[in-house]
Image: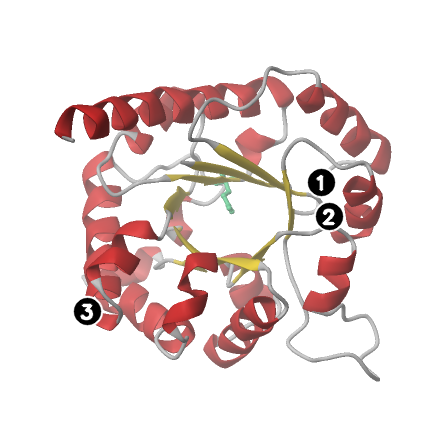
Amino acid sequence: MLVAGNWKSNKSFNEAKEFANAIAAMPQAPAGVEVMIAPPAPYLAAMGDAQPPFRLGSQNVSATGSGAHTGEFTAEMLAGCGVQDVIVGHSERRDGYGDDDKVVAEKVSRVLDAGLRVIFCCGESLQDRQSDVHFDKVLRQMESAVLHLPAEVMDRVVVAYEPIWAIGTGLTATEEQAQEMHAAIRGWLREAFDDATAKSIPLLYGGSCKPANADALFACEDVDGGLIGGAALDPDSFRALVEAAGRVSALRMQAGAEAS
Ligand code: PGA
């Protein structure tokens, strides 16, 4: 299970340091649970230097290499600051900052080339869902950014399904809606790669995931954690999400032990 916090453009630098200290003071993440936090980019180097007890994520990366690209930062620069995971393809970047499918595919490749792990986001709009094209939409996004990747990098790919209508709206996909889309993504990965790859790729749900609904969402068979915005900003609510993942992880480990 992976619990990934996306702070977006929130928190002052001091608040970020306080949060990191609060997390450091908490008990270790439960067995089988990874924790990732993606603060605003200007804080990454300092947070990386402090060697936090969680994976450090970036919310963005440049689609270009080093050179005359004012304001951009490369995947290699992120790696040098201690970043391990990079979120690519978030709908807020697709809709507001020109990250179209081509740019997203380029960013995914650059993250992987730099040896980092990518958290690739996909998801449909409300209109897509109402027109019943949500599966097509999401699987086309997968195709354009993931299909061309060599099999050997797939252990550094995480997919986050984030229905746009659920992001920051308080509306959450039902467990059925989340599970059926995650199963479709898993099935697509099986076809595009193989069964072992499909099973091993963590599939996160994102979109108004919070302590009140995390147990139910995380318990879905093909949901392996969450990409969390609003509910990741407060240490107590973030810890509650990590604990929810811990409960599901314990059940899965128990089921795995009984099956073997
Ligand atoms: P939210 O954001 O949890 O605030 O809905 C999720 C995301 O955008 O990753």
Indicate whether 187 appears above or below 191: above
Residue closest to the eye, 173 or 40: 40
At mark 2, the secondary structure is loop
- Disc 2: CA contacts within 10 A as few (<14), some (14-19) or many (>=20): many
Q: CA distance from mark 2 to mark 1?
A: 7 Å
The residue under label 3 is which amino acid type?
Answer: Glu
Give the position of the N terminus as an image quadrant. Answer: top left
How far across and how far down the image is residue 180, in percent? 18, 48
At mark 3, the secondary structure is helix
Total numbered circles: 3
Disc sitting over residue 10 in the figure? 1
- Disc 1: CA contacts within 10 A as few (<14), some (14-19) or many (>=20): some
At mark 1, the secondary structure is loop
Which residue matches tag 3? 191
Indicate whether 136 appears above or below 18: below
Indicate whether 137 appears above or below 168: below
